[in-house]
Image: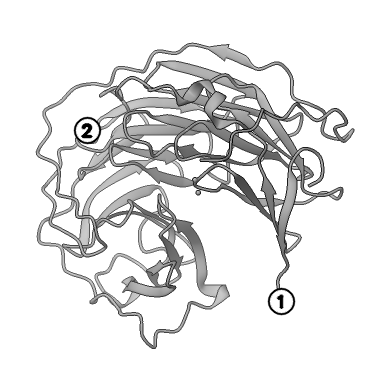
Amino acid sequence: MATPAAAPPAPPNPNPVPDDPPPQQEEEATEPVQEPETSSSPPPPVLTTSIEPTPSGDEGSESDDSSSVSSAASSAPAPAAAGGAAGRPLPAAKDLLHISFNQDYGCFAAGTKSGFRIYNCDPFREIFRRDLAAEGDGSGGGGIGVVEMLFRCNILALVGGGDNPHYPPNKVMIWDDHQSRCIGELSFRSPVRGVRLRRDRIIVVLENKIFVYNFADLKLVHQIETAPNPKGLCAVSQQPGSIVLVCPGAQKGQVRVEHYGARKTKFINAHTSRVACFALSQDGRLIATASTKGTLVRIYNAAEGNLLQEVRRGADRAEIYSLAFSNNLQYLSVSSDKGTIHVFNLKINVGSTTNDKPMPAPDPEIPHISPPLSFIKGKRVAEIFPL
C-alpha cells in the first residue's frame, strides 16, 4: 500500500506476552533452484491490461509426479455473457465461497456457488460476472472456491469449490475471459488450497506442497515441501525483476522465504506456536506474521530474517484473518474474528533494509503452468468496528 518516512528500526519488544515469546535466532540455508525438464513451448497468449480480454494461444503440456498440464479444446462453448454493474444484487453470504484482491488492490474477485464476479474497489462497482451454473455444459455445478486475478488482464485462475463445484477441486483452470473459456489446466493428486499469480509465475498451493510454474510455457521450476497448510498460506512479491516467495516452513512457527533472484532460502522462526497468517510487501522487503494465538504481529526483514517490529493486537486469543501492508509501508492492517480491523503505524526505516538492493533478474527456471502469459512499538492509529 506506499515510502514511509525514514525512522530507525524499532527494537524487539522487551516485554513479550508469556504465551508467545520472542522468536528464536533465524536459520539460513541455501537451495539452488530446481532445474525443470525442458520441452518446446508454444507462443504464450496475449494479455490485455484491462478486464476486457484478448485471445490466447494453445499451450503445450508437461507432467511431473504430482501435477499435469493440459490445454482446453478450442471449440469449447462460450459461457453466459458478462454481467454489468447496475442493478445486480450482491451475492448472499451463504453463497460466497472465496474473496481475494488482485495484485494492486484495485479490484477483488468473489467466488460463489454459481460462478464468480469481479468488482472494482474505488469507485465500488461490479465489473462483470460469470454464471457458470447456467452454462449447462455438463461439467457440474457452478461452485468456484478460488478465483485469482492477474492485475486487470483477461487471465484468471479458477478452482472449483463448494458442495457442487464447477471444476474438480484438484485442478487449476486457466480462464481467458476474452475467449470466455478455459485455455489450460493443471491437475494434482490432492485438492488445491490456493493459487498466486505473477506476470511470469503461477504458484499452486496444496496441503503439504507448493508448485511454482513458469507462466509462459507451463514448465515446473520448483517444488517446496511445507508443514500442513490447510489455509493455503502463500505470498509472492509483485515487483518486476525479483521474485520473493513466502510460505510455511517445515517446522511449527517457521516461515520459509525463497529469494529466487539471489538463489537463497531463508528460514525465520517467527513464533513458538503455528503460523496462522502472514503478509509480504509488494516489493518483497517486509514480512508480517501472526500465530494461532493472535495476540502479537511481528514484522521481519525478508532478506536477513531479523525482527524489525512487534505490535500487539490485544490480550485475548483471536483468529487472524488477514494482514496487509500499505503501499508506502507506513501502515499495517490486521483483521480478526473479533470483528475489528486494527491499523498500526510502522516504525521501520525501509531504506535500511538490505532487500531494497536491486536483485538479479529472475531465473527462467521456476515452476510451470499454463500459457499466457497497539501498544508496544507500533501505535494503533485506527480501529474499525462493525456496525
What crowding class fits label 1: few (fewer than 14 Cα within 10 Å), some (14-19), or many (20 or more)?
few
Instruction: Give the side of residue 374 with respect to residue 34, left or right.
Output: right
Identified by mark 2, the residue type is Glu
Distance from label 1 to label 2 (Cα)? 51 Å
Seen in the picture, residue 314 relative to 78 is either above or below; the reply is above
Give the residue at mark 2.
Answer: 62
Instruction: Give the side of residue 317 with respect to residue 136, left or right.
Output: right
Residue 267 appears at what percent x and percent y?
59, 20
Residue 282 appears at what percent x and percent y?
45, 40
* Tag shown at residue 199: none
Residue 234 appears at what percent x and percent y?
51, 39
Disc 2 is placed on an element classified as: loop
Identified by mark 1, the residue type is Leu
- The residue that appears at 11% across and 28% down in the rendered structure is 40
* Tag shown at residue 387: 1
Seen in the picture, residue 158 relative to 347 is either above or below; the reply is below
Nearest the viewer among 150 and 73 is: 150
Nearest the viewer among 197 and 42 is: 197
What crowding class fits label 2: few (fewer than 14 Cα within 10 Å), some (14-19), or many (20 or more)?
many
- The residue that appears at 68% across and 26% down in the rendered structure is 307
| Render colour scheme | one colour
Instruction: Give the side of residue 263 with respect to residue 39, left or right.
Output: right
* Residue 142 visible (yes or no): no
Disc 1 is placed on an element classified as: loop
Front position among marks 1 and 2: 1
Seen in the picture, residue 253 relative to 44 is either above or below; the reply is above
**Which quadrant would the C terminus be assigned to in this image?**
bottom right
* Residue 114 visible (yes or no): yes
Nearest the viewer among 341 and 160 is: 341
Residue 43 appears at what percent x and percent y?
9, 39
Instruction: Give the side of residue 386 with respect to residue 357, left or right.
Output: right
- The residue that appears at 55% across and 29% down in the rendered structure is 226
